[in-house]
Image: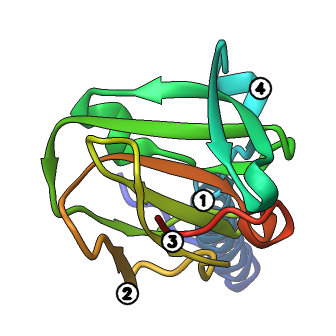
Amino acid sequence: MKIKLSFQNKYLLIISTIILILSFVFLQSRMKKEEAVINLNNFDQIYKADKTIRLVGENDRENGFKVDIIDDAKKMEQGLMFINVMKPENGLLFDFKNSQNVSFWMKNTYIPLDIIFITEDNIISSISKNTQILNDKKTYTSIDKVRYVLEINAGLSDRLGIQIG
Protein backbone atom coordinates (compact mmCIF):
# COMPACT_ATOMS: atom_id res chain seq x y z
CA MET A 1 0.00 0.00 0.00
CA LYS A 2 1.47 3.32 -1.05
CA ILE A 3 0.73 6.58 0.67
CA LYS A 4 0.66 9.53 -1.60
CA LEU A 5 1.14 12.93 -0.03
CA SER A 6 -0.38 15.97 -1.58
CA PHE A 7 1.63 19.12 -2.02
CA GLN A 8 -0.17 20.68 0.96
CA ASN A 9 0.57 17.68 3.21
CA LYS A 10 4.25 17.68 2.18
CA TYR A 11 4.44 21.36 3.04
CA LEU A 12 2.87 20.75 6.47
CA LEU A 13 5.22 17.84 7.13
CA ILE A 14 8.30 19.95 6.28
CA ILE A 15 7.15 22.84 8.47
CA SER A 16 6.32 20.49 11.36
CA THR A 17 9.77 18.89 11.10
CA ILE A 18 11.48 22.29 11.11
CA ILE A 19 9.47 23.40 14.16
CA LEU A 20 10.31 20.16 15.95
CA ILE A 21 14.05 20.57 15.22
CA LEU A 22 14.06 24.22 16.31
CA SER A 23 12.21 23.33 19.52
CA PHE A 24 14.76 20.63 20.27
CA VAL A 25 17.68 23.03 19.66
CA PHE A 26 16.06 25.71 21.83
CA LEU A 27 15.45 23.28 24.70
CA GLN A 28 19.00 21.97 24.52
CA SER A 29 20.50 25.46 24.67
CA ARG A 30 18.15 26.37 27.54
CA MET A 31 19.23 23.27 29.49
CA LYS A 32 22.91 24.15 29.04
CA LYS A 33 22.28 27.67 30.33
CA GLU A 34 20.49 26.33 33.38
CA GLU A 35 23.38 23.95 34.10
CA ALA A 36 25.77 26.91 34.09
CA VAL A 37 23.93 28.70 36.89
CA ILE A 38 26.23 28.98 39.89
CA ASN A 39 24.87 28.93 43.40
CA LEU A 40 26.61 31.58 45.44
CA ASN A 41 26.46 31.42 49.21
CA ASN A 42 27.10 33.54 52.25
CA PHE A 43 30.06 32.44 54.35
CA ASP A 44 27.66 31.61 57.21
CA GLN A 45 25.76 29.13 55.03
CA ILE A 46 28.84 26.97 54.45
CA TYR A 47 31.18 27.51 57.40
CA LYS A 48 30.48 27.44 61.14
CA ALA A 49 33.22 29.91 62.24
CA ASP A 50 33.28 28.62 65.80
CA LYS A 51 36.94 29.35 66.61
CA THR A 52 38.60 32.71 67.23
CA ILE A 53 42.05 33.68 66.02
CA ARG A 54 43.70 36.87 67.28
CA LEU A 55 46.23 38.88 65.29
CA VAL A 56 48.16 41.74 66.81
CA GLY A 57 48.10 44.93 64.75
CA GLU A 58 49.51 48.43 65.17
CA ASN A 59 49.90 49.67 68.75
CA ASP A 60 49.64 46.06 69.93
CA ARG A 61 45.91 46.14 69.24
CA GLU A 62 44.42 42.63 69.08
CA ASN A 63 42.10 41.85 66.19
CA GLY A 64 39.86 38.81 66.56
CA PHE A 65 38.40 36.84 63.68
CA LYS A 66 35.80 34.09 63.96
CA VAL A 67 37.15 31.38 61.71
CA ASP A 68 36.43 27.92 60.46
CA ILE A 69 39.58 25.79 60.45
CA ILE A 70 40.23 23.92 57.23
CA ASP A 71 42.62 21.00 57.55
CA ASP A 72 41.73 18.47 54.87
CA ALA A 73 42.63 18.54 51.18
CA LYS A 74 39.09 18.60 49.77
CA LYS A 75 38.02 21.55 51.92
CA MET A 76 41.30 23.32 51.17
CA GLU A 77 40.64 23.03 47.46
CA GLN A 78 37.14 24.48 47.92
CA GLY A 79 38.23 27.34 50.19
CA LEU A 80 36.06 30.41 49.65
CA MET A 81 34.99 29.50 46.12
CA PHE A 82 31.38 30.42 45.37
CA ILE A 83 31.10 32.57 48.50
CA ASN A 84 29.81 36.05 47.72
CA VAL A 85 29.46 37.52 51.23
CA MET A 86 31.71 37.23 54.28
CA LYS A 87 31.31 39.40 57.38
CA PRO A 88 34.37 41.48 58.33
CA GLU A 89 34.83 39.50 61.55
CA ASN A 90 34.92 36.16 59.71
CA GLY A 91 37.79 34.38 58.04
CA LEU A 92 38.98 30.99 56.89
CA LEU A 93 42.08 29.48 58.54
CA PHE A 94 43.95 26.79 56.62
CA ASP A 95 46.08 24.46 58.77
CA PHE A 96 48.55 22.52 56.65
CA LYS A 97 49.77 20.50 59.69
CA ASN A 98 53.40 20.99 58.61
CA SER A 99 55.38 24.00 57.44
CA GLN A 100 55.60 24.24 53.68
CA ASN A 101 55.50 26.70 50.79
CA VAL A 102 51.91 27.13 49.70
CA SER A 103 50.12 28.83 46.82
CA PHE A 104 46.56 30.05 46.45
CA TRP A 105 44.53 31.12 43.46
CA MET A 106 41.19 32.90 43.16
CA LYS A 107 39.36 30.55 40.80
CA ASN A 108 35.59 30.93 41.36
CA THR A 109 36.27 33.26 44.30
CA TYR A 110 33.80 36.14 44.23
CA ILE A 111 35.16 38.30 47.05
CA PRO A 112 38.59 39.96 47.12
CA LEU A 113 40.74 38.79 50.00
CA ASP A 114 43.82 39.52 52.03
CA ILE A 115 45.74 36.24 52.29
CA ILE A 116 47.89 36.16 55.43
CA PHE A 117 50.68 33.56 55.52
CA ILE A 118 51.61 32.52 59.09
CA THR A 119 54.56 30.39 60.24
CA GLU A 120 54.40 27.51 62.69
CA ASP A 121 55.66 29.97 65.33
CA ASN A 122 52.56 32.15 64.71
CA ILE A 123 54.51 34.91 62.97
CA ILE A 124 53.08 36.60 59.88
CA SER A 125 55.52 35.82 57.08
CA SER A 126 53.79 37.69 54.24
CA ILE A 127 50.44 39.12 53.17
CA SER A 128 48.92 39.07 49.69
CA LYS A 129 46.58 42.05 49.75
CA ASN A 130 43.43 42.69 47.74
CA THR A 131 43.60 39.57 45.56
CA GLN A 132 42.01 39.58 42.11
CA ILE A 133 38.65 37.79 42.12
CA LEU A 134 37.77 35.04 39.63
CA ASN A 135 41.37 34.71 38.49
CA ASP A 136 42.71 31.19 38.04
CA LYS A 137 45.90 32.33 36.29
CA LYS A 138 47.56 34.33 39.08
CA THR A 139 48.78 32.57 42.22
CA TYR A 140 49.57 34.00 45.62
CA THR A 141 52.52 32.16 47.15
CA SER A 142 54.08 32.23 50.59
CA ILE A 143 57.57 33.70 50.76
CA ASP A 144 58.61 31.34 53.56
CA LYS A 145 57.44 27.95 54.66
CA VAL A 146 54.19 28.41 56.59
CA ARG A 147 51.83 26.21 58.52
CA TYR A 148 48.76 28.46 58.46
CA VAL A 149 47.01 30.74 56.01
CA LEU A 150 44.25 33.11 57.04
CA GLU A 151 41.88 34.50 54.40
CA ILE A 152 40.00 37.66 55.38
CA ASN A 153 38.15 40.36 53.45
CA ALA A 154 40.40 42.55 51.32
CA GLY A 155 41.58 45.75 52.94
CA LEU A 156 41.19 44.55 56.52
CA SER A 157 44.89 43.91 57.07
CA ASP A 158 45.65 47.57 56.25
CA ARG A 159 42.64 48.92 58.12
CA LEU A 160 43.52 46.95 61.25
CA GLY A 161 47.27 47.52 61.01
CA ILE A 162 48.11 43.83 60.57
CA GLN A 163 51.72 43.62 59.43
CA ILE A 164 54.50 41.18 58.67
CA GLY A 165 56.54 40.08 61.67
Q: Are marks 4 and 2 in contact (CB under 8 Å)?
A: no
N-term mark: 1 or 3: 1
Please give left or right for residue 117 compared with residue 10 in the image.
left
User: Percent position (x, y) of residue 26?
Assistant: 68, 68
Query: Pointer 3: what residue?
Result: 127
Q: Of discs 4 and 3, which sits in the foreground?
A: 3
Neighbor class of circle 3 (other Cα within 10 Å; few <14, some 14-19, many 20+) is many
N-term mark: 4 or 2: 4
N-term mark: 1 or 2: 1
Query: Pointer 2: what residue?
Result: 137
Q: Residue at x 71, y 83 (%)?
A: 11
Q: CA distance from mark 4 to mark 2?
A: 28 Å
Please give left or right for residue 80 compared with residue 9 in the image.
left
Give amino acid for label 4.
Asp
N-term mark: 4 or 1: 1
Q: Could you tell me which secondary element the residue under label 3 belongs to?
A: strand
Query: Pointer 4: what residue?
Result: 44
Q: CA distance from mark 1 to mark 3?
A: 33 Å
User: Percent position (x, y) of residue 14?
Assistant: 63, 79
- Which numbered dot is residue 36? 1
Give amino acid for label 2.
Lys
Q: Could you tell me which secondary element the residue under label 2 belongs to?
A: loop
